[in-house]
Image (cartoon, grey):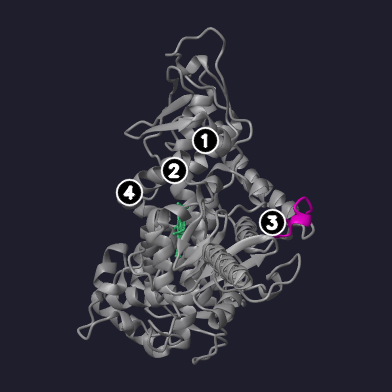
Amino acid sequence: MEDLQSFLIVCLSCLVSTILVRAILTKTRTTARLPPSPPALPIIGHLHLVDRLPHQAFHKISNRYGPLIHLFLGSVPCVVVSSPEMAKEFLKTQETSFLNRPNRSVLNYLSYPWSDFVFAEFGPYWKFMKKLSMSRLLGGQTLDQLLPIRSDELRRLLKLILERANEKEAVEVGGELTKLTNNVFSRMIMSKRCAENDEEGDEIRKAVNETAELLGKFNFSDYIWLCRKLDLQGYWKKSKEIHEKFDKMMEKIIEEHQEAITKVEEKGKYKDVLGILLEILEDESSEVRLTRENIKAFVLVFGTDQDGFVFSVARRSNSDILKMDIRNGAMVVFTKETLSRAGGVRITVPAGLGPNVCARDLRIRMPDWKTRSEVFVAGTDTSAITIEWALAELMNHPNIMAKAREEIDSVVGKTRLVEESDIVNLPYIQAIVTETLRLHPAAPLLPRESSEKCTINGYEIPAKTQLYVNLWAIGRDPKHWEDPLEFNPERFLSEEGTLKNQLDVRGQNFHLLPFGSGRRVCPGASLALRFVTTSLAAMIQCFEWKVDGKDGPVIDMQEGPGLTLPRAHPLICVPISRLSPLPIFYSALDHLT
Ligand code: HEM
């Protein structure tokens, strides 16, 4: 009997411990369950599966493992999202956990305040920059004010194309479009064309393309722990070179402005932010003494503040919070830490000063603020690439090109050039741009990083996991798009030819997210849509485009590597002037040199 009792006790203990162990294991597995993942290799993780076009490589893996996958890029954990439903979970439901961007070591060499915005940690500095860019830099009023610049630069491009057409010469479309967008943004920011001649333009275009490419490259230093201090691929060296190019450009512009300030007859020539800042630089009684480096940074960051700005810095009692007061509105509050992290600001308060110390008593040094304009990359490359893809698609689809022209001819006519204000009346052209953004999103992978641990769809996503939303794959998802690989603008139009509601591309429809979504959505979307649509419309209004004098589907549509989505092969074609004797050019272009 005793034996039986002991036997039962042992059996019961075994059962209980088995249940307990199982329960613990199941719990551990549930809480630590990562999304599906292909087998990884030691050290490199899944890097061997990610080739020079990561969005395509991720798409292939997702086709096998599902719309949410977990990968190790070297030693860095990341998740890739490839369906609209999953994108909504990450970018909307759990948005607050994914407001940061992954760090890139090349940024330490390219590192400037503006890049600190695009890649900045979500916090006061980012909020300030976002507010400033949404309200001032890229807000509707500023865009309206700066319309003449866009219009003027577009006419310059058309004039150049016309000259090539008259000579029956080919145009490298992407190159000319990058020069156009460079000049537009540069003039919007500092009243200055950045490419006065071809050589200069080519230099800048190269630097812009290289920067986008560098930011999109898989850098071993970022992903392989053992290589974190080594520049094996030479990307850091290249970043420094690019920085120097941008810096040289800024120096040249500052010198011109300074020269104008010293000449009485040129006083007031530059009524732009740079001019005002240089006046502050010279003013010894100014509240804050600026350095040349500060100025280069400020111009590129706060560029289009046409009224100029004054800022004062004050210290609040018993805290190290600083206020930055921008004229005409924004009052911004930074902590010392945020500023230090954001731009290397060093602030020292002389001993013995009271709580309401005024700015001129503070010693403010921003020695590490260097210049470079991420805006050139964020804005110019993306816009130029989109126009180039759109034109390539139209050349491959002559019927769509013909319909687009018909629309422009009937709405705008042949005696004037299409303008931004015409866009609302050109639904077919708008649909073409949207269809281009669906198939060729200029930023194919939307990069974020988790700031805290969270659970999504039953999977655990640890803190500091990189997130890539594959916008390219989402735009081609057959569950949401009929004939997803077909270029078909009609999908966005109703039977009456008006735009369908689902046309919104600014983050409300998760199956079409070319500009991202939520708080970190692209602040340049309105500018891009206005500018891309009008430029494309003008290029098809004024010219026919041929490759080697031929029509037909001859344009190769392969993609090249980069943070943005460039074409693998440049689009080189011969323009043929459509409107003879080109009244729109004679009236609108004559004054241009
Ligand atoms: C066709 C043109 C463009 C496309 C497709 C595009 C796309 C994007 C995407 C996908 C993001 C990430 C959004 C997210 O994380 O949710 C982004 C961010 C950004 N874009 Fe654009 N963009 C374009 C044009 C522009 C222009 C013209 C500018 C400025 C002049 C600009 C400035 C920025 C900035 C500053 C950010 C970072 C915002 C932040 O982190 O808060 N973009 N863009």
Q: Is mark 4 within 8 Å of ligand 1?
A: no
Q: Is mark 2 within 8 Å of ligand 1?
A: yes
Residue at horizontal 22 percent and vertical 86 percent from the top: 495
Look at discs 2 and 3 and give the one toward the viewer.
Answer: 3
Query: Mark 2 — residue?
Result: 129
Location of residue 535 by image quarter? bottom left
Secondary-structure class at tag 1 = helix
Sequence-first tag of 2 and 1 = 2
Secondary-structure class at tag 3 = helix
Question: Relative to 285, does residue 231 appear above or below in the rendering?
Answer: below
CA separation in Å, label 2 and label 1 = 12 Å
Please say whether residue 225 is one of the residues in the magenta stretch.
yes
Sequence-first tag of 2 and 4 = 2
Counting from the top left corner in percent of width and height, residue 1 is at 59, 72
Look at discs 4 and 1 and give the one toward the viewer.
Answer: 1
Q: Answer yes or no: do the residues labelled 3 and 1 have beta carbons within 8 Å? A: no
What is the number of the mark on residue 338?
1
Query: Mark 4 — residue?
Result: 145
Q: Which residues are magenta?
A: 221-231
Q: Amino acid at mark 3?
A: Asp
CA separation in Å, label 3 and label 1 = 23 Å
Q: Is residue 40 left or right of residue 405?
A: right
Q: Is residue 393 left or right of residue 564?
A: left
CA separation in Å, label 2 and label 4 = 20 Å
